[in-house]
Image (cartoon, rainbow, N blue to C red):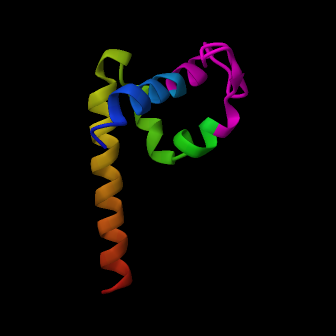
């Protein structure tokens, strides 16, 4: 988590927010080195319903949104574990 958060995942979350604001495309981007398809990246990294949280944060506060997403995912997995093994 410390290695991939800032150089990789935070820019992906910013890109996710740009998709919803209409500034980026889910299918192709020129921002990816020489350009390339983005649908695979979207489905692998960004298709979680928890990522909707980033729509409520500015890009400057994306690390805070990321921490909130991690906390909510952890809490939901603990709740699921509790309900299954209750």
38 relative to 85, above or below = above
Residue at 67% x, 39% y: name it: 40
Q: Position of residue 36 (x, y in %)?
A: 71, 23
Magenta segment: 17-40
Q: Is residue 67 left or right of residue 14?
A: left
Residue 7 highlighted magenta (yes or no): no
Q: Quadrant of the C terminus?
A: bottom left
Asked where in the image residue 11 lies, by quadrant, the reply is: top left
Residue at 57% x, 18% y: name it: 21
Asked where in the image residue 44 lies, by quadrant, the reply is: top right
Q: Nearer the viewer, residue 35 or 29?
A: 35
Q: Nearer the viewer, residue 9 or 48?
A: 9
Residue at 42% x, 33% y: name it: 9
Q: Is residue 65 left or right of residue 34?
A: left
64 relative to 48, above or below = above
Q: Position of residue 29 (x, y in %)?
A: 67, 18
Q: Quadrant of the N terminus?
A: top left
Q: Position of residue 5 (x, y in %)?
A: 34, 34
Asked where in the image residue 32 lies, by quadrant, the reply is: top right
Q: Is residue 23 left or right of residue 75?
A: right
35 relative to 80, above or below = above
Q: Is residue 10 left or right of residue 40?
A: left
Q: Position of residue 62 (x, y in %)?
A: 34, 25
Q: Nearer the viewer, residue 13 or 20?
A: 13
């Amino acid at each position: 988590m410390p290695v991939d958060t800032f150089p990789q995942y935070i820019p992906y979350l910013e890109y996710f927010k740009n998709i919803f604001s209409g500034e980026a495309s889910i299918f192709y981007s020129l921002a990816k080195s020489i350009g390339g398809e983005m649908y695979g990246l979207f489905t692998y990294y960004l298709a979680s319903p928890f990522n909707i949280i980033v729509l409520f944060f500015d890009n400057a506060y994306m690390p805070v949104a990321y921490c909130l997403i991690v906390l909510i995912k952890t809490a939901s997995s603990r709740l699921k574990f509790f309900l299954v093994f209750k």
